[in-house]
Image (tube, rainbow, N blue to C red):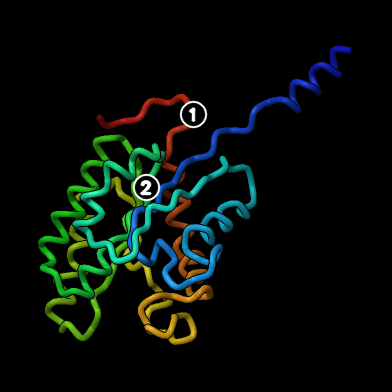
Amino acid sequence: MFRAGAARAQVQAPSPRPVRLMALGDSLTAGYGLPPGQGFVPQLQAALAARSGAHRPVRVLDAGVSGDTTAGGLARLDWALAETPDCVLVELGGNDGLRGLPPEGSYRNLAAILDRLAARGLPVLLAGMLAPPNLGADYGREFAAVFQRLARERPAVVFYPFFLEGVAGDPALNQPDRIHPNAAGVAEIVRRILPAVAALLALVPPPGAPRTGG
């Protein structure tokens, strides 16, 4: 009788609350040009669900807006945070580079985003970006330095240097516009970034633990 009751209690025990990972980004996050289920968010969700071993479940929240710049991401940050994430992947800057916007402005916007997230005690993964080569070597160096500087100044942030690593410039992994990855390209992005995402998730406090920050 006691054992049966214990078994029922085990069956009825609630599942652990999923970690809410918010992906704050642009069209690369939003899955521009891809069929449902093939964008970055659903593919990352599937990859995390398939991880072996004992892990807390993860729910990936899609906060990607096609065409968004770093300024746009900053402007909608408070609205996005209403989704109450436990950690945040920041993927912004590609449209700043495509438009040739001043790198110092991109730096200020991203720094403000990271500082607001830190004030809330939210662990962050910052995905870097590179500028298109047609804008010149000087601009490319200045643009890449934005992300490197942010990572140096904020050692608590998990840094993944180039979101499109292994995919950019490969026709087989990109849509005809040669800017946005196809489904296979997204799968490669997810495969490569997964260790950094795992490092981010490891920073999320267990349920009930207090967060640092304001």
Spatial CA distance of label 2 from label 1 is 17 Å
Residue drawn where x is 35% and y is 38% of the image: 82
List the residue tagged with mark 1. Answer: 207
Mark 2 neighbour density, 10 Å: few (under 14) some (14–19) many (20 or more): many
Determine if residue 159 is in view: no
Determine if residue 33 is in view: yes
Pick the residue in front: 71 or 186. 71
Q: Indicate left or right for 175 with 75 as reference.
A: right
**Where's the C terminus, which quadrant?**
top left
Amino acid of disc 1:
Pro
Residue 81, picture quadrant: top left
Which residue is at the far top? 2
Q: Nearer the viewer, mark 2 or mark 1?
A: 2
Amino acid of disc 2:
Val
Pick the residue in front: 53 or 81. 81
Mark 1 neighbour density, 10 Å: few (under 14) some (14–19) many (20 or more): few
